[in-house]
Image (tube, rainbow, N blue to C red):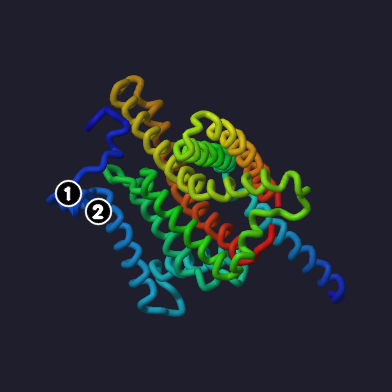
């Protein structure tokens, strides 16, 4: 058998193996896991923002304001978290 | 057998009550199952690494496979710089995995279905990673909160958002593990209750459901331990190789 032919066949086989590995890694996380990961990212950031606002309100005695502000900042942080981890998943 | 599906998560005292000041440190069923899983891990890895034969037996194969699995996971996600932290991540992964798996045996207690357990694990990781970041980069670690290429007007808002998103890490890490374990076990208990209440006529459908759920739960138990460990690696990677 000519050497070139063997080499191309080897290349094709290697490529197939690496493609397979890539697909395996993609399939490792189930769809439920993905959905759960994204939703907890969002909820956790909102919770942290609200807690920080609550602590500020308690210490400064400005009852609703910091909680309101930090709730929305937490929502923004949660959305950036979700976008970031979704980008990581697509890699 | 209690009909309440949440009664499986009850923590109760085993043996005498021990108190230091106002803190109750009595031995509970949660502590019992933590000790059981730790002992099982120690036993398996002791036996598995004792003989070191070229052709491994089953226990040695298990130990070697899990070693190379975690080792590959760390080098894939956090790079070669994270090698010194292998022992920590390996024991963390094994502990969570064994706690989850012991919970799958009927009449046992699932330690990881309590948020305080997972939150303590996650906050240890969070504090540890932050300390490592400050040791490696000094105050340059704070650059993590200041992404490049942001207009100066928006900067204060962005920094607050970044800090909140950083602080939310331990919460999302712990809630994910806890909620997965608790939801799965509650669902299994509910379907088990349906089998009893529908009796021999209609009980077959929920019975088949709970068989399928058991398989799913074993998958989830493994997957959540894996996710917990891999997210630790990702956070460690952020601390070791500072780039955003």
Snapshot quadrant of residue A75: top right
Instruction: Tell me the number on the disc at residue B32.
Output: 2
Query: Quadrant where the N terminus of chain B lies?
Result: top left
Residue located at (42% from left, 49% from top): B119
Establish whether labels 1 and 2 are both on one chain.
yes
What secondary structure is found at the residue carrying circle 2? helix
Q: Rate crowding at label 1 as few (under 14), some (14 to 19) or many (20 or more) other CA atoms within 10 Å.
A: few
Q: Is residue A64 left or right of residue B1?
A: right
The image shows residue A43 at horizontal and vertical percentages of 54, 37
Q: Is residue B49 left or right of residue A20?
A: left
Nearest the viewer among A54 and B203 is A54
Image position of B71 with respect to B2: above or below: below
Q: Rate crowding at label 2 as few (under 14), some (14 to 19) or many (20 or more) other CA atoms within 10 Å.
A: some
Residue located at (56% from left, 65% from top): B133
What secondary structure is found at the residue carrying circle 1? loop
Residue located at (32% from left, 31% from top): B5
Residue located at (41% from left, 79% from top): B52
Q: Earlier in the sequence, mark 1 or mark 2?
A: 1
Which residue has dot 1 on it? B14
Instruction: Tell me the number on the disc at residue B101.
Output: none
Query: Do tag 1 and tag 2 residues touch (Cβ < 8 Å)?
Result: yes
- Give the chain letter at badge 1: B
Q: Is residue A36 visible?
A: no
Snapshot quadrant of residue B185: top left
The image shows residue B154 at horizontal and vertical percentages of 73, 44
> What's the CA distance linking mark 1 and mark 2?
9 Å
- Give the chain letter at badge 2: B
Nearest the viewer among B39 and B199 is B39
Q: Is residue A25 visible?
A: yes
């Amino acid at each position: 058998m000519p050497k070139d032919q063997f080499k191309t066949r080897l290349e094709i086989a290697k490529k197939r193996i690496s493609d397979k590995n890539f697909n395996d890694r993609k399939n490792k996380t189930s769809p439920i896991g993905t959905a759960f990961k994204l939703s907890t990212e969002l909820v956790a950031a909102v919770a942290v923002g609200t807690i920080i606002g609550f602590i500020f309100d308690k210490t400064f005695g400005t009852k609703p304001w910091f909680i309101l502000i930090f709730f929305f900042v937490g929502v923004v942080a949660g959305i950036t978290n979700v976008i970031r981890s979704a980008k990581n998943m697509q890699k | 057998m209690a009909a309440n599906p949440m009664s499986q998560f009850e923590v109760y005292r085993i043996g005498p009550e021990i108190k230091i000041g106002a803190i109750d440190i009595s031995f509970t069923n949660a502590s019992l199952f933590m000790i059981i899983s730790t002992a099982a891990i120690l036993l398996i890895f002791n036996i598995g690494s004792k003989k070191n034969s070229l052709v491994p037996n089953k226990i040695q194969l298990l130990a070697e496979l899990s070693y190379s699995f975690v080792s590959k996971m760390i080098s894939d996600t956090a790079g070669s710089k994270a090698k010194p932290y292998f022992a920590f991540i390996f024991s963390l992964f094994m502990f969570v995995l064994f706690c989850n798996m012991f919970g799958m045996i009927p009449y046992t207690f699932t330690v990881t279905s309590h948020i305080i357990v997972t939150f303590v694990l996650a906050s240890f990781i969070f504090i540890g990673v932050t300390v490592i970041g400050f040791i490696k980069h000094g105050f340059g670690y704070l650059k993590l909160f200041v992404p490049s290429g942001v207009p100066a007007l928006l900067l204060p808002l962005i920094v607050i958002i970044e800090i909140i998103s950083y602080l939310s890490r331990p919460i999302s890490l712990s809630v994910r593990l806890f909620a997965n374990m608790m939801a799965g076990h509650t669902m299994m208990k509910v379907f088990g209750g349906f089998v009893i209440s529908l009796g021999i006529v209609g009980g077959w459908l929920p019975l088949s459901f709970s068989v399928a759920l058991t398989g799913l739960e074993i998958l989830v138990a493994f997957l959540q331990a894996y996710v917990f460990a891999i997210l630790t690696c990702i956070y460690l990677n952020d601390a070791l190789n500072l780039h955003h």
